[in-house]
């Protein structure tokens, strides 16, 4: 089964209107999201890890698409030795033969600068370096049914992420009809028709942040979104944030229903009043009565269109709420494993003297 089929089972048709290009993008983002989130789980991380060998060609590796460097080892000619990460600013000390920090093939180092991983001493034939890393497959598309470097059981998480983003986009693209302009009557003896009630859709802010780890809205941790916590390697807080968004959605759904019920009450009162004014106008002017009747027809057409739009919006909202819950439950399974294992995220300390 293709990812397109799985996504459409959740969000409905994505061909008309055409959401396929956005769906491809959200699938790619979903792979990064799930890979980043579940890289905290050692067992899953091991299964997502791939290797790149560095020797005389190439001697370095691009990290542009890499989410996590798992380990770097360098062969000294007889055995592999683990390399410790250093700051790029300190690289010169480790390559300077006159420095007390000069490092040999027996104590290799590595650093990342400008998106490139460098190993000290430089890898060579017979003394290669092996970089183990987690790099998401960014070539995934709707027609695919599998994802490289990602265990099969995690693909559902990618589908849920893409569906979540598509539903959010579909909700944003629901445009409500314009309230018809009230008719102006020539006969001043007739009562003013007033203005037809309009539906004011409640608003909601779902903060998922960015995978860069910075919240550009306020810059405070209290406002961090789910993705911010993932980028900051705090899966527990990411789970809390995801749960908070689910609660906000439940309240939002209730607000939509309450506001729409209130609108329908006001509309019923207004249309009843219009019908009475039609009858009153017939006594004064048949043409004025027809003007009011036509206006009443436009109000009824507006209401019919609004009901159809709100039915779509309500369905998207409920599906969105369901997907958030499913995604949260999916991620919880692996987060629980991480908590049980008591994983430590600390990085090795620099061996330089302060």
Image (cartoon, grey):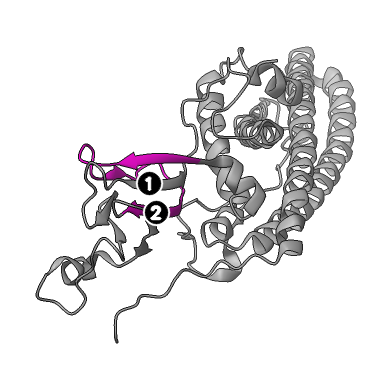
User: Residue 82 location, x and y as percent?
Assistant: 40, 60
Q: Nearer the viewer, residue 256 or 62?
A: 62
| Residue at the (78%, 41%) spot, across then down | 326
Few, some or many residues within 10 Å of mark 2 (<14, 14–19, 20+): many
Magenta residues, as a range?
50-75
Q: Nearer the viewer, residue 160 or 144?
A: 144
User: Residue 335 location, x and y as percent?
Assistant: 72, 55
| Residue at the (59%, 16%) spot, across then down | 17
State the CA–CA distance, disc 1 to disc 2. 6 Å
Element type at mark 2: strand
* Residue 101 position by quadrant: bottom left
Q: Is residue 57 covered in magenta?
A: yes
- Above or below, 218 against 266 in this view is below
User: Residue 292 location, x and y as percent?
Assistant: 76, 21
The image's mark for residue 331 is: none
| Residue at the (77%, 14%) spot, across then down | 290
Q: How many marks?
A: 2
- Above or below, 11 against 1 in this view is below
The answer to whether residue 34 is visible is no
Q: Is residue 41 left or right of residue 349?
A: right
- Which of pointers 1 and 2 lies earlier in the amino acid sequence? 2
Q: Which residue is mark 2?
A: 72
Residue contact between numbered discs 1 and 2, judged by CB atoms under 8 Å: yes
Q: For the C terminus, which image quadrant?
A: bottom left
Q: Is residue 330 left or right of residue 225?
A: right
- Above or below, 292 against 330 in this view is above
The answer to whether residue 274 is visible is yes
User: Residue 87 location, x and y as percent?
Assistant: 29, 67
| Residue at the (74%, 21%) spot, across then down | 305
């Amino acid at each position: 089964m293709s990812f397109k089929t799985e996504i459409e089972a959740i969000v409905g048709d994505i061909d008309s209107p055409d959401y396929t290009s956005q769906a491809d993008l959200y699938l790619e983002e979903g792979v990064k999201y799930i890979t980043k989130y579940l890289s905290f789980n050692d067992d899953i991380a091991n299964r997502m890890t791939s290797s790149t060998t560095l020797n005389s060609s190439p001697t370095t590796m691009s990290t542009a698409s890499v989410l996590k460097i798992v380990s770097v080892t360098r062969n000294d000619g007889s055995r592999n030795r683990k390399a410790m990460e250093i700051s790029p600013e300190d690289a010169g000390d480790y390559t300077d033969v006159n420095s007390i920090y000069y490092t040999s093939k027996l104590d290799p180092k590595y650093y990342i600068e400008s998106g490139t991983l460098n190993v000290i001493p430089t890898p060579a034939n017979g003394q290669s370096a092996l970089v183990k890393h987690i790099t998401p497959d960014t070539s995934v598309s709707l027609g695919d049914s599998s994802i490289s470097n990602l265990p099969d059981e995690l693909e559902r998480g990618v589908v849920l992420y893409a569906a979540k983003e598509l539903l959010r986009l579909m909700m944003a693209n629901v445009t409500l009809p314009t309230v018809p302009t009230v008719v102006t009557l020539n006969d001043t003896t007739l009562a003013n028709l007033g203005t037809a009630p309009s539906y004011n859709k409640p608003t909601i802010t779902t903060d998922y942040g960015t995978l860069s780890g910075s919240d550009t809205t306020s810059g405070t941790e209290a406002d961090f979104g789910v993705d911010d916590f993932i980028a900051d390697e705090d899966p527990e807080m990411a789970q809390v944030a995801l749960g908070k968004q689910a609660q906000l959605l439940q309240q939002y759904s209730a607000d939509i229903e309450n506001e729409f019920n209130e609108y329908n009450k006001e509309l019923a009162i207004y249309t009843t009043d219009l019908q009475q004014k039609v009858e009153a106008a017939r006594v004064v002017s048949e043409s004025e009565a027809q003007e009011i009747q036509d206006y009443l027809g436009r109000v009824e057409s507006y209401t019919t269109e609004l009901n159809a739009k709100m039915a779509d919006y309500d369905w998207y909202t409920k599906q969105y709420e369901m997907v958030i819950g499913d995604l949260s439950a999916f991620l919880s399974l692996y987060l629980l494993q991480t908590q049980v294992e008591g994983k430590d995220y600390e990085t090795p300390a620099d061996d330089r003297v302060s």
